[in-house]
Image (cartoon, grey):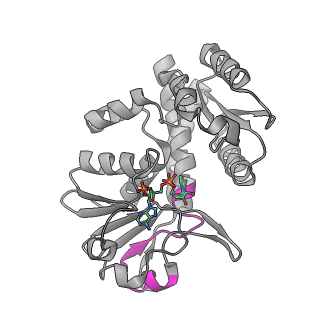
Amino acid sequence: MSATLLSGKDASAAVLQSLESDIASLDPKLVVVQVGEDPASSSYIKQKFKSCQSVGMRSEHKHMPATTTLDELMHEIVALNADPDVSGFIVQLPLPAHLEKHVPDIIKSIEPRKDVDGFGAYNLGKMFLNKDFEDLPPATPSGIILLLDHYNIDVAGKHVVVVGRSNIVGKPVSMMLLNRSATVTICHSKTKDLGTITRQADILIAAVGRPKMITADMVKDGVVVIDVGMNRTDDGLCGDVDFDAVAEKASAITPVPGGVGPMTVASLIRNCVRAAQRQE
Ligand code: NAP
């Protein structure tokens, strides 16, 4: 493989180290609300707490049973909004089926100054204005930007193709790249002849949730590939990109795991520090 490996482990360690002195002086606290027992969520939450611990940041797990009602969850959110000791909190998604249709209302009920996942309309809206208003940007898109920055990959003037248009990854990362003067094309399930578009990418971001769907014939030589996908298959965890084949053509590529995942955690912690700064 000739491609540079874009290590989220190395880049996230650098981001976390840069936050240590602010964490020591502000003593922020992150709360993660989990409803039910989704195994993937439990593993992501474990990673979040491990990283908090590594930088000396306080964290708390509010683990509620799968039978929690909407009223009970809203009651917890109201209490967290009002608790001056809590700098920021997230409600880990996905929620159990009976709560899933209420996700927009649940996100809306989180106080914007404590919305460290950056999923609420207030923080998303600010992010749309321009780079200077990206105060609490969504964690995964901002992790991707931090990763590109760490490896000095300038996006200005580059053609970035984003595959996926979700509200938590595809759309916001496209906007953050536009804020940095990239030329952005967004693709989705109705896009016709996807390969013709992805082959034009200087930087390709795959955020779909389909194992190895980006194959070597869909990329040009020298492309930078950011694989956001986290797919649990019988053969273990894999991304949306056929790593081995695409790495032969790419100039740089993220691994899965160890790429975007650790960056998401680092930017969540960065958001929590920023939230604490604003609440001071
Ligand atoms: P999502 O909400 O399911 O969105 C998937 C997107 O992919 C949709 O916009 C969908 O298009 C598009 N899509 C589906 N099939 C397609 C196809 N054949 N061709 C082109 N586009 C297609 O997923 P998400 O929440 O954005 O997550 C995407 C992946 O990233 C998942 O594997 C998830 O686990 C992973 N993820 C990882 C992290 C991390 O920290 N590493 C964080 C978040 C998510 P339509 O809109 O037309 O349906």
* Residue nearer the viewer, 167 or 128: 167
- Please indicate, yes or no, whether residue 155 appears anywhere in the rendered image: no
154 left or right of 117 in image:
left
Residue 256, position as x, y percentages in the image: 57, 68
Q: For the point 31% across and 63% down, which residue is it?
A: 161
* Residue nearer the viewer, 228 or 94: 94
Residue 162, position as x, y percentages in the image: 35, 60
- Is 251 magenta? The answer is yes
- Is 188 magenta? The answer is no
Task: Determine whether 20 is above or below 107 in the image.
Answer: below
* Residue nearer the viewer, 221 or 154: 221
Magenta region: 244-261
Tell me which corner region of the image, top left, top right, bottom left or bottom right, holds residue 28: top right
Q: For the point 34% across and 78% down, which residue is it?
A: 219
Task: Determine whether 275 is above or below 12 in the image.
Answer: above
190 left or right of 12 in image:
left
Residue 6, position as x, y percentages in the image: 46, 67
197 left or right of 54 in image:
left
Number of residue marks: 0
Residue 200, position as x, y percentages in the image: 24, 73
Task: Determine whether 62 is above or below 211 in the image.
Answer: above
Q: For the point 36% across and 85% down, which residue is it?
A: 217
Q: For the point 46% across and 31% down, which residue is it?
A: 120
Task: Determine whether 88 is above or below 160 in the image.
Answer: above
10 left or right of 184 in image:
right
The residue furthest left is 157
